[in-house]
Image (cartoon, grey):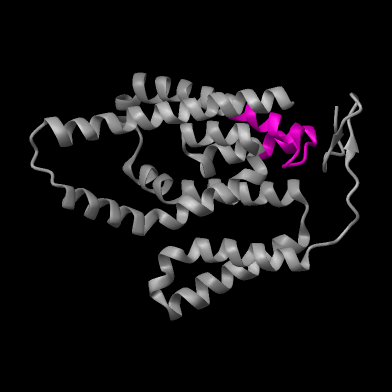
Amino acid sequence: MAEFDATTSRWGRLTMLAGLVFSLAGPLYLVFFADLGVTATALFTAFAAVAGTFFVIWIIEPITYFPILGPASMYQAFMIGNISNKLLPSALIAQARIGAKPGTHRGGLAAVMAICGAAFVHLLSLLVFVGILGTWLISVIPESVTDVVRVYVLPAVLGAVIIQAIVSLKQVRATAVAAVVAALVQFVLVPLVPALGMAATAISVIVTLVIGWYVRKREPFEPAVSASGTAEPGDSASA
C-alpha cells in the first residue's frame, strides 16, 4: 500500500498539472495571441468575480470528499468531475457492497475501482445516447418529460447519495447533527441574512464538523490487523 500511495501521488500530481496546462492553454492563447483586447484589469476582475462565488467551494469540497474517497480517488475525481452526483455515489455504493469503511485502505481501493467503472459507463453512455442517438432521442422525448427530468434528476441523485452515506457510515449522531444544522442554516439563517446564501453550504459543513467532533461517540482506538499482519486503522473487514 505504501508503494501504491507513492505511485498514485506521483502520477496524480503529474496528471493534474497536465490537465491544468491543457485547460489554460486555450484561454491563454486567446488572451496573448488572438488580439481580443483583453486587459490585465479585465482578467483580474473576472477572476475576482469567479473566486468570490466559488472560493468557499474550493475549500469545502476537498475537505468533504477526502474522508470517503481517499488520496488516490481524489486525483481521479477532480480530474473527471461530476463528483457529488456521479463519482461519490459510486464510491459509497462500492464500499457498502463489500463492507469497506471509508477512510481505510480497503475503502480507498474500492473507491478507485468504482470511479474507474463510473467513468467507463459515463463515456460509453455519452457515446451511445449522445454521440449516436442524441438528436433522435431529443426529437422523440416529449418536452414535458424533459422539463421534469431537468428539475428533479439532481435532487433525486443527491437524495440517494445522502441515504447511501447514512446507511454505510452508520453514524447516528453525526447524521442528526448534520440534518439539524442544515435545516437551521437553510430555513433560519439564510432568510435572516440573505447575503450568506452563497456560503450556506460551507457554514453547514463547518458547523457540522465542529459540533460532530464534540458529540461523537468516544471509543478506544483499536486498529484492525489484516491477513498480512499489518495494522489498518478502522478497517474491521480487512481481506
Q: Is residue 65 magenta-colored?
A: no
Q: Quadrant of residue 132?
A: top left
Q: Nearer the viewer, residue 148 or 112?
A: 112
Measuring from the top left, give residue 228's x and y in whole percent: 89, 24
Question: Which residue range is magenta in the image?
Answer: 92-115
Q: Residue at x 85, y 31 (%)?
A: 238
Measuring from the top left, give residue 131's x and y in whole percent: 35, 21
Assign the magenta stretch its main secondary structure: helix
Question: Left of 174 or right of it: where is 81?
Answer: left
Q: Residue at x 89, y 57 (%)?
A: 219
Question: Left of 129 or right of it: where is 70?
Answer: right
Question: Left of 206 or right of it: where is 177?
Answer: right
Q: Is residue 113 magenta-colored?
A: yes
Q: Nearer the viewer, residue 151 or 26?
A: 26
Measuring from the top left, give residue 6's x and y in whole percent: 65, 26
Q: Is residue 178 visible?
A: no
Quadrant where the N terminus sits is: top right
Q: Is residue 235 visible?
A: yes
Q: Is residue 57 above or below residue 173?
A: above
Measuring from the top left, give residue 45's x and y in whole percent: 22, 55
Q: Is residue 61 above or below residue 100?
A: below
Q: Quadrant of residue 180?
A: bottom right
Quadrant where the C terminus sits is: top right
